[in-house]
Amino acid sequence: MNILVLNASPKGKNSTTLQTALYLEALFTEHKFTVLNVGQKIKVYEKDIQPVREALINADIIMFSYPVYTFIAPYQLHRLIELIKSDGVDISGKFATQITTSKHFYDVTAHKYIEENCFDLGLKVIRGLSADMDDLLTEKGQNEAKMFFEQLIFSCENNIFVTPPSVPEKKEKSIYRPSLPESKKNKRQGRGNCYKLRRG
């Protein structure tokens, strides 16, 4: 399979997150990996999105690779998604996943943001890998990365993916209706009551 790694780290080739993707490339040589360092080249792609467009069209799997610094994906990735949407390239039906590194501090927020944008683009979402910064240095972390990728390929081959959350139906707005029937006021009664109150 052709796997496009969109490396959104501003560190480019020195990104810790990218090392996980490169580790998987070394393990699974039967798949073709293409890396675009969009984090460092976002200003270039703002002027010419063509290289990204071609890479997206040729990919079977789009893998978003990025660090989570402050709860969310880096600005460069936000901007890239804006550019892809405004370009109008049709990538619907392709598979998408993500690899992140963080200290597991609100990384779920970043993952959800990417997933929702993938749904907007018509992509088939497969849950990503959320790793710690040092995971790749441990046997446990390496095994988790390997299992993630094996599950990813299995899901693609068997067309298993996450479906977008259903949008709740809009309920008809209820207008206030009085519960008691309307009754006509008796003018005399009203005056009499006022009179009685004054005397009392």
Image: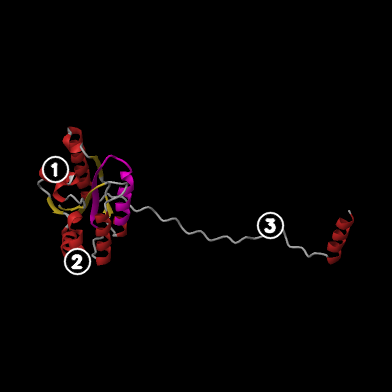
Under tag 3, what secondary structure? loop
Task: Classify mark 1: residues with Cα within 10 Å, few (<14), some (14-19) or many (20+).
Answer: some
Three-letter amino acid code at the position of disc 3: Ser
Label 1, label 3: how far apart the Cα atoms are: 69 Å
Task: Classify mark 3: residues with Cα within 10 Å, few (<14), some (14-19) or many (20+).
Answer: few
**Which of the two discs, 2 and 3, sits closer to the camera?**
2
Q: Which of 28 and 196 is in front in this view?
A: 196
Rendered location of residue 31, percent (x, y): 12, 49
Label 1, label 2: how far apart the Cα atoms are: 32 Å
Asked whether residue 60 is in view, the answer is no
- Judge whether residue 42 is colored magenta: no
Q: Which residue bears the numbered disc 2? A: 47
Query: Badges 2 and 3: C-beta atoms under 8 Å apart?
Result: no
The scheme the figure's colours follow is secondary structure
Q: In this view, does 182 lie to the left or right of 84?
A: right
Q: Nearer the viewer, residue 190 or 117?
A: 190
- Judge whether residue 95 is colored magenta: yes
Q: Is residue 26 left or right of residue 177?
A: left
Three-letter amino acid code at the position of disc 2: Lys
Rendered location of residue 176, percent (x, y): 62, 60
Q: Which residue bears the numbered disc 1? A: 23
Under tag 2, what secondary structure? helix
**N-terminal label among 2 and 3:** 2
* Residue in view at x 83 percent, y 62 percent: 190
The numbered mark at residue 120 is none
* Residue in view at x 16 percent, y 35 percent: 137
Label 2, label 3: how far apart the Cα atoms are: 64 Å
**Which of the two discs, 1 and 3, sits closer to the camera?**
1
The numbered mark at residue 179 is 3
Asked whether residue 94 is in view, the answer is yes
**N-terminal label among 1 and 3:** 1
Tell me the magenta residue range.
Answer: 93-117
